[in-house]
Amino acid sequence: MRIAIIDTSTTRAAIISDGLREAGLDDLVIIDPSGPLVAQIESTSPEVVLINLENPSRDLLEDFFAMSRALARPIAMFVDQSDAEATGAAIDAGVSAYVVDGLSKQRIKPVVELAVRRFQAFSRLQRELDDAKNALAERAVIDKAKAILMKRRQIAEPEAYALLRGQAMRTNRRISEIAEAIVTSDALMGEIE
Amino acid sequence: MTGERFRIGFLPLVDAALPILAHELGFAEREGLHIELVRDMTWATVRDRLLYDHTDAAHMIAPLAIATALGRDRPAVPLAVPFVLGLNGNAVTFSTSLSDAVGLGDTLGDPQAVGAALRTIAAARKAAGKPLRFGVVHRYSSHNYMLRYWLAGVGILPDDDVEIVVTSPPFAADALAAGEVDGICVGEPWNSIAVDRGVGHIALATAQIWRRGVEKVLAMRAATLDERRDVVEALVRALHAAAAHFVEPDTVEASAEILARPEYLDAPRDAVLRAITDRIRLAPGGEPMHYPDFMFQYREAANFPWRSQAAWLYSQMVRWDYMTFDPAQAATAGQVFRPDVYRSALAGSGAPLPGASSKLEGGLAEPIGAGSTQGRLTLGSDRFFDGRAFDPDDIESYLAELP
């Protein structure tokens, strides 16, 4: 069963194809997102197409599938009416699947389920990465605010931190928000003594 | 009713204005609603989010709502359209080389004359083995049906003499610039962006093809309407109030400012402003010209979902999907539009409410008073460029007479 993967994220495409290979599905085509989409699909004639939900080429792709009704094995969107939950889960995970007409449900289901799991794993990774990036950015802004306070008030680092923390607790805001306000006001008013 | 959450999917287009303004300017809050807007880049994604409950309603191209209800390309899901978000607002833009070949002038040309010039070029290009190619935003879009109506009406067979492909609006100017297409039929601000980038020349406004053509609608699952009827009626009132505000001349600057923002259209404010004030710059470097009714968002009960509009779209679906006319399907298509919900939502508000739910489309050459159950209603000219009229009760004869 030949499976084509179209994804704006090459990392996610790799994660999905690894998963499919591990499951013994190794007839895979990874579509180059910068190349001509329809020509690539046409020349590889996949039986299943997996595409990320937010891919900007989906309208174009669906038009091609609709036109391909004239072909021997037309492709349609994977909508299993007996199991709307499965399609819903795929949409929730951010993946849509298109399959050729007549492919048995038993064969498609594991592919879609696997893609869903891999999409979810990717989102989790992305979230963790974003959190880590935010944490780093927050730490940087807090350090900057501390340095400003130390210089302006001629105090030591622990006292500067205590000031930030105290203000945050009193105003019910995050330390990073207080720090950001200090850095911003310093940038605007730094020259005024 | 307070704080009812209602999620609405949209594409970054000028005619997503009403839900955006209803949210931004407090018309929704006043009705006890909290609108959450969900921005996407393709109609396929807008549709999927609507069908799988990521959204409660969507800004949608009208033919796609009907195609979804009829189960074209996928299993049918009953949809309801209680409100039309606008009429027209699209244009046909040629690449600069096609514009030169056709001889587009400084003003909008006559659809017949531009079509006649285009026919000669289309024939030459076809004979040379390189047929003209046009991009439309979706196969089930009013853009596709308007373009095809015009081409067929001037003797160009859309599926034989030229090629029509799908190009997403935000990429349409790129496709023109790269020479992938010779013309596009898209919504604003994407025609104006192509002109401002120097890669296109606006040939026609779609309002010249059908003066009162139905464009975007507010679509939702029929089940949502049944379960949350009160909320939907409140939303109709909020959108209607937003529409009244939107067409006030002194609000346009502020509206353009909001729409242009990155979370909405993420487009140049000036291009948005030109579209919503019916001023279009036809050619690179030219002065914008005023074309009244380029976009039509409020007057003449423009937001009323006439069943005859749905029927016309169904007739074009039959025509271009090469289907056989089916009275049951025609009835299903017509029932997607819900004038009854519009009426009950706006009863007692002073908004003009048409007495009929269906009308002859394209039958009016002059403005005329129309029967209403509330308020005074005048309908302006709604002509098709070829002068034909559409009788929703006799779709078969209409189809038989079309070229």
Image (spheres, coloured by chain):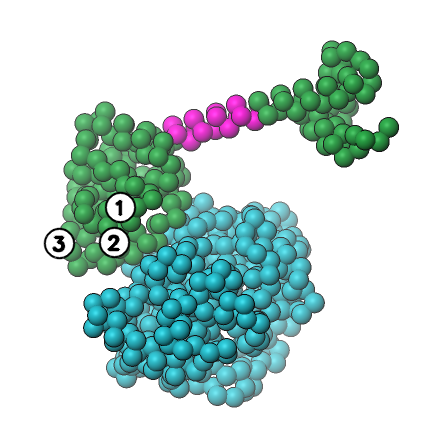
Chain colours: A green, B cyan
In the picture, measured across the screen, residue B74 lies left or right of residue B52, that is left
In the picture, measured across the screen, residue B379 lies left or right of residue B139, that is right
Q: Chain of mark 2?
A: A
Q: Nearer the viewer, residue B321 or B333?
A: B321
**Dot label at residue A65:** 2
Of mark 3 and mark 1, the one earlier in the sequence is 3
Secondary structure at badge 1 equals strand
Say which quarter of the image contains residue B80. Answer: bottom left
Q: Nearer the viewer, residue A92 or A71?
A: A71
Density class for disc 1 (Cα within 10 Å; few <14, some 14-19, many ≥20) is many
On the image, the x and y values in percent for residue B31 come to 64, 56
Q: CA distance from mark 2 to mark 3?
A: 12 Å
Q: Nearer the viewer, residue B236 or B373?
A: B236
Q: Which residue is mark 1?
A: A98
Give amino acid for label 2. Phe
Range shown magenta = A121-135
Density class for disc 3 (Cα within 10 Å; few <14, some 14-19, many ≥20) is few
On the image, the x and y values in percent for residue B352 come to 59, 75
Residue at 53% across, 25% down: A133
Mark 1 and mark 2 in contact? Answer it, CB < 8 Å. yes
Residue at 46% across, 49% down: B40
Q: Residue A74, can we see it?
A: yes
Above-or-below relation of A84 to B197: above
Of mark 2 and mark 3, the one earlier in the sequence is 2
**Dot label at residue A72:** 3
Of mark 1 and mark 2, the one earlier in the sequence is 2
Give amino acid for label 1. Tyr
Residue at 73% across, 12% down: A157
Density class for disc 2 (Cα within 10 Å; few <14, some 14-19, many ≥20) is many
On the image, the x and y values in percent for residue A24 come to 18, 27
On the image, the x and y values in percent for residue B266 come to 54, 51
